[in-house]
Image (cartoon, helix red, strand yellow):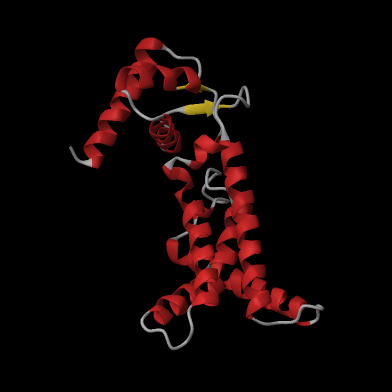
Amino acid sequence: MSNNSKTNDLTRIILEVINEEKPQSVKHLTKMLKESLNLAEEEIIESILKLQAKGVLKLKEDSPQSWSLATYLKTGEAVWYWVTITAGVLTAVLVFTISESIYPWIIARNVLGVIFVLFLPGYALMKTLFPTNMHAKTSIRGLEEIERIALCIGISIALVSIIGLLLYYSPWGLDLTTVVPTLLAFTSVFATAAVVKEYQQRKPTWMEI
């Protein structure tokens, strides 16, 4: 069975259960589906979030105990966070362990280095400032892909310039040993803030169709 077919079947089952059983909370719905389908909670919640994004379900917050941040981080909606953190950490490791003479690893280091400097800081900040579940005019998803990439690059260049200037006049100075950890810390902090904000705004407990 293909992934699309499996996703469509799960979506159909979720809607059938909602219409027939009338669960009053996402927690209740998740429990019912886990018992009948033997699926992971993260997979069920991810499907519910996709239905919310399509406007099929209207989810409202009632109790903050409905689901946890740890559960949200295991769903597909949080993949961007893990990719961002992994790319940042991997770049830092390669910068400090791969020398210019080690081929072809130096290519990977240079490519990741460009992304690390010219994209990740701006991307993390954009995700924090523009939550993905807001209306299209103010959401990062409301922008075209090229516009989002251009904005992330522009913001990254500005941020790196400011960070570099601050480090230059700081007691630590401006070199790889200060720039890389600082950019990694900046990206990690804002990416974490963004995923927490995203979780809080998507945190559902009961639903309407």
Q: Residue at x 49, y 66 (%)?
A: 90
Residue at (45% x, 49% y) in the render: 79
Q: Name the quadrant of the C terminus.
A: top left
Relative image position of residue 183 (x, y in whole percent): 63, 68
The one of 203 and 93 positioned closer to us in this rendering: 93
Name, please, the residue furthest toward the bottom.
Answer: 101
> Could you tell me which quadrant the N terminus lies in?
top left
Q: Is residue 10 left or right of residue 67?
A: left
Pick the front one: 100 or 67: 100
Question: In the image, residue 73 lies at what x, y percent?
Answer: 51, 42
77 over 146 or under it: above or below: above
Extreme-left residue of the structure: 1
Residue shown at the point (55%, 50%) measured from the top left? 139
Residue at x 61% of width, y 58% of height:
188
Relative placement, left or right, of 146 versus 137 is: left
From the top left corner, tell me how far across and down residue 12 is, in percent.
Answer: 29, 26
Q: Is residue 132 left or right of residue 163?
A: left
Image x and y of residue 59, in percent:
52, 27
Q: Quadrant of residue 179?
A: bottom right
How many numbered badges does the structure rendering display?
0
Answer above or below: position of 96 versus 185. Answer: below
Above or below for 205 versus 141 = above
